[in-house]
Image (tube, helix red, strand yellow):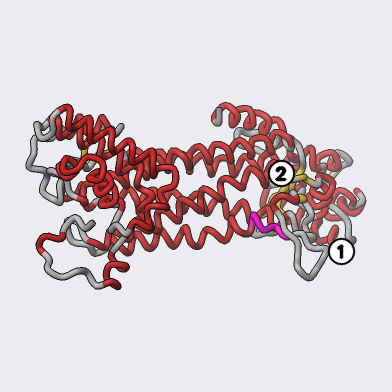
């Protein structure tokens, strides 16, 4: 049933109908549409349009629709309705007759869909935050298991300075914590109710919009009807928070894909999140992580698509805004899957501590500690840096670690180097000295783990 057919004499072209109808995807707004309609029925009662008995009939019928269709809204696609709003109205009329036709009094599909979408975004953001907290908890658990496990730190993908696995895990914890904050910030601006804005100019009925907003759990009402029906900033912001989160997940995935390779062999991934090769029996492919990395393209594309959709729209509502839902739904669905699979990856991952330690020792990553040692002997840092570089070259030529170069060889380059240098060059000593706030010493990491556990409770 079309909600707008009185002015038209001809039926819609079948191709146009397929092109125009949105039920195949906006059926996902069924629950939100019914919530909004129940609140609108109460508002109409307050405005004197519906009696208390009529409002009760409408609300009971809407609740019955939600019970029948809400658990599997995809079934309603076969109804042939134009969109979720027309489906709900048709179902309501089936149940209460002409009374169902009064529910749309003073309401437009423009403010209706804007309200539905805000409710949906608010619900989805809450779900993403819960998933982020679960992923953070797995990172904290990894950090706690491997608080003092050595891991080579990298810059430019070259071994730089030794760190620990706990510090690595908590770096991603911090990224996801900022994602929680971004989603919460987006939810705050999404939490305004446009219902009562009508098509664009506001409703002509004495609707108590503040009470309507409270009934739907919004913090307030939108203040301008033109903006209320056409604003999709909240969609852009939700997508933007999702993109940033996906980028963080992709970076984490890339690290672990490298670390799980034979060249690194720092970790072994669980069989539960890997697959084999149809040709090569020895393969164990990091498919879960590669898919996390790969999903970023479509999540980023959804954000770009939404920005392009709204960039040149005149006020107020335009049909272009029907294009807001598919990228939003797709982005949230895929981000949810990525966040859901990450704890499975992390919880089942085994760290090869010996391989990590060998790599940390083998890359002359303690060179900065040698330079710091020379500074302690009164040598200016720039000169100490130069001397250390020469000593690293000697170690490379000898095919040994810095700490394995004989003292006599070290003293040929700098006579002030003493026997005490070797204690300074151990991996453990170097990390222990980085005992500043936010540093990589096991002591500081243990403190950070404790703080992170408090934040995800």
Q: Which residues are magenta?
A: 285-289
- For the point 56% across and 46% down, the residue is 339
- For the point 77% across and 57% down, the residue is 264
Marker disc for residue 163: 2
Question: SS at mark 2?
Answer: strand
Q: Position of residue 79 (x, y in %)?
A: 34, 56
What crowding class fits label 2: few (fewer than 14 Cα within 10 Å), some (14-19), or many (20 or more)? many
Please say whether residue 383 is visible from this viewpoint. no
Distance of label 1 from label 2 (alpha carbons): 26 Å
Asked if the stretch drawn in magenta spans residue 286, the answer is yes
**Label 1 vs label 2, nearer the camera:** 2
Q: Position of residue 12 (x, y in %)?
A: 22, 69
Q: Quadrant of residue 372?
A: top right
Q: Nearer the viewer, residue 314 or 389?
A: 314
Q: How many marks?
A: 2
Q: Quadrant of the N terminus?
A: bottom left
Mark sitting earlier along the chain (1/2):
2
Please say whether residue 61 is visible from this viewpoint. yes
- For the point 72% across and 49% down, the residue is 272
What crowding class fits label 1: few (fewer than 14 Cα within 10 Å), some (14-19), or many (20 or more)? few
Q: Position of residue 155 (x, y in %)?
A: 65, 55
Q: Classify 375 as above or below 448.
A: below
- For the point 64% across and 59% down, the residue is 156
The reply, left or right, for residue 385 in relation to residue 337 is: right
Give the dominant element type of the magenta stretch: helix, strand or loop. helix
Q: Quadrant of the C terminus?
A: top right
Marker disc for residue 397: 1
């Amino acid at each position: 049933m079309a909600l707008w057919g009185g002015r038209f004499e001809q039926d819609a072209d079948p191709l146009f109908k397929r092109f125009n109808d949105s039920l195949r995807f906006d059926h996902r707004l069924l629950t939100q549409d019914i919530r909004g309609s129940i609140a609108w029925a109460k508002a109409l009662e307050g405005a004197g349009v519906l009696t208390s008995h009529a409002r009760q009939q409408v609300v009971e019928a809407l609740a019955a629709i939600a019970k029948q269709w809400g658990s599997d809204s995809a079934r309603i696609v076969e109804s042939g309705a134009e969109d979720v709003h027309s489906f709900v109205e048709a179902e309501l009329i089936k149940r209460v007759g002409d009374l169902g036709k009064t529910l749309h009094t003073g309401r437009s599909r423009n403010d209706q869909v804007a309200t539905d979408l805000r409710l949906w975004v608010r619900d989805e953001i809450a779900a993403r935050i819960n998933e982020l907290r679960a992923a953070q908890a797995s990172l904290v658990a990894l950090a706690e298991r491997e608080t003092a496990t050595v891991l080579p730190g990298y810059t430019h993908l070259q071994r730089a300075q030794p760190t620990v696995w706990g510090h690595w895990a908590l770096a991603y914890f911090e990224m996801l914590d900022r994602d929680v904050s971004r989603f919460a910030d987006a939810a705050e601006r999404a939490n305004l109710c446009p219902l009562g804005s009508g098509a664009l100019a506001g409703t002509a009925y004495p609707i108590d919009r503040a009470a309507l907003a409270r009934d739907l759990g919004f913090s307030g009402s939108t203040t301008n009807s033109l903006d209320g029906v056409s604003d999709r900033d909240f969609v852009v912001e939700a997508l933007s928070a999702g993109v940033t989160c996906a980028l963080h997940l992709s970076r984490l995935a890339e690290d672990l894909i490298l670390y799980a390779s034979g060249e690194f062999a720092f970790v072994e991934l669980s069989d539960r999140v890997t697959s084999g090769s149809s040709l090569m029996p020895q393969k164990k492919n990091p498919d879960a992580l590669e898919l996390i990395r790969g999903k970023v393209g479509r999540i980023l594309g959804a954000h770009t698509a939404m920005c392009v959709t709204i960039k040149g729209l005149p006020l107020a509502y335009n049909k272009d805004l029907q294009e807001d839902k598919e990228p939003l739904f797709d982005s949230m669905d895929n981000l949810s899957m990525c966040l859901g699979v990450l704890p499975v990856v992390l919880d089942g991952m085994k760290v090869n501590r010996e391989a990590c330690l060998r790599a940390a020792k083998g890359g002359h990553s303690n060179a900065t500690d040698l330079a710091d040692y020379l500074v302690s002997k009164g040598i200016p840092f720039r000169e100490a840096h130069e001397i250390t570089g020469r000593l690293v070259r000697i170690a490379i030529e000898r095919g040994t670690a810095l700490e394995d170069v004989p003292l006599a060889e070290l003293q040929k380059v700098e006579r002030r180097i003493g026997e005490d240098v070797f204690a300074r060059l151990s991996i453990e000593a170097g990390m222990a000295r980085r005992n500043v706030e936010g540093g990589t010493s096991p002591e500081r990491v243990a403190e950070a783990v404790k703080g992170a556990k408090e934040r995800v409770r």
